[in-house]
Image (spheres, helix red, strand yellow):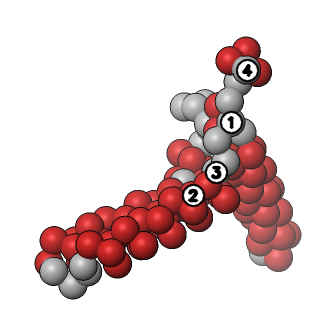
Amino acid sequence: MAATMIVGALAACTYAVLIALHVAAIRHDRGVAGANRPRVARWLAASGERRRARRESNAVQRRIDGELDKAAYQVTMAQIAAQDAIERPLQVPKSLL
């Protein structure tokens, strides 16, 4: 019984490490984040994008509801854009330089 649990735990740890490696690869190089990656890895790697999209969506909804004036909305969107620039800097292919 204990041997079965140990083997199961080792298999689970192996899968967790492999998924973590895929997530790291997706976050590092967006061009390789295609359909050949495990779905769970793509979902985990996109958590930052979902967070930014949720924050932007909330700002738009608050602006529509009248909770934010124009200046506060612009400040919020500028903060979101600045954080996005830090997390995902623009990469221009060398062929275009």
Under mark 2, the amino acid is: Asp
Nearer the observer: mark 1 or 4; the answer is: 4
Q: Nearer the viewer, residue 44 or 89?
A: 89
The answer to the question of whether label 1 and label 3 lie on touching residues, with beta carbons closer than 8 A, is no
Instruction: Kindly identify which residue carries mark 4.
Output: 97
Say if mark 2 contacts mark 4, CB within 8 Å: no
Q: Is residue 94 above or below residue 39?
A: above
Give the quadrant of the C terminus: top right
> Considering the numbered disc 2 on the image, is that residue within a helix, a strand or a loop?
helix
Find numbered disc 4 in the image and state the secondary structure of the residue it sits on: loop
Sooner in the amino-acid sequence: mark 4 or mark 3: 3
Amino acid type of the residue that numbered disc 3 sits on in the rendered structure:
Arg
The residue labelled by disc 3 is: 88
How many marks overall? 4
- Residue of label 1: 91
Residue drawn at point x = 64 percent, y = 41 percent: 90
- Mark 2 near mark 1, Cβ–Cβ under 8 Å? no
Tell me the amino acid under the disc marked 1: Gln
How far apart marks 2 and 3 lie (CA) works out to 6 Å
Q: Which residue is mark 2?
A: 84
At which x and y percent is residue 28? 74, 46
Circle nearer the viewer, 4 or 3:
4
Residue at the location (57% across, 47% down)? 42
